[in-house]
Image (tube, helix red, strand yellow):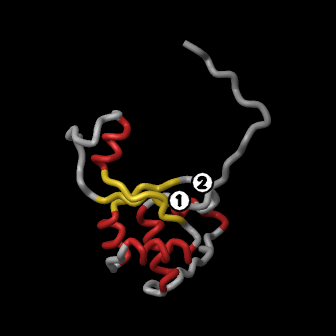
Amino acid sequence: MPTVSVGRDRLFAALGRVYTQDEFEALCFDFGIELDDVTTEKAIIRKEKHLEEDVEADGDDEVIYKIEVAANRYDLLCLEGIARSLRIFTGSEATPIFKIASIPRGSMLQMHVRSRPHKLDHM
């Protein structure tokens, strides 16, 4: 399953509420995703470069949540998608209503696909 890294403070700002880690883990569990790891950019860089804990690493001290999402939920692969889905789940945002647009047939685009592609000239 994909893991999405998001800044905790930016996520909470998008959710319109600050959660404790336990509250957020419970929310994720109830929604069907998992808070996989809590880290910082510095810790990620330190791990990637195999640096010791006492060695100073470049990067920010912002807390990063690594959230594991279902592979078939493409809407959850970014901070905005996770935040929107959680706001709808908690009831702080209404479920969007999507409508099919009625487009006049004459203004629709058409695409014609040939059975065999043309041979491309190589340089």
Instruction: Residue type at mark 1: give it.
Output: Glu
Rendering quarter of residue 59: top left
In the rendered view, would you say 35 is above or below 41?
below
Residue found at the far left of this picture: 56
- Counting residues from the start of the chain, the first of labels 1 and 2 encountered is 2
Q: Which residue is mark 1?
A: 68
| Residue 56 placement, left or right of 43 | left
In the rendered view, would you say 70 is above or below 118?
below
In the foreground, 31 or 39: 39
Q: Residue 35 at what x, y percent from top left?
A: 48, 64
In the rendered view, would you say 74 is above or below 92?
above
Q: CA distance from mark 1 to mark 2?
A: 6 Å
Q: Residue 71 at what x, y percent from top left?
A: 62, 56
User: Which disc is residue 1 wearing?
Assistant: 2
| Residue 69 placement, left or right of 5 | right
SS at mark 2? loop
Give yes or no for contact between labels 1 and 2 (Cβ–Cβ under 8 Å).
yes
User: Which disc is residue 77 wearing?
Assistant: none
Residue found at the far right of this picture: 115
Instruction: Residue type at mark 2: give it.
Output: Met
| Quadrant housing the C terminus | top right
Residue at coordinates 47% horizontally, 71% vertically from top-left?
25
Q: Residue 38 at what x, y percent from top left?
A: 39, 59
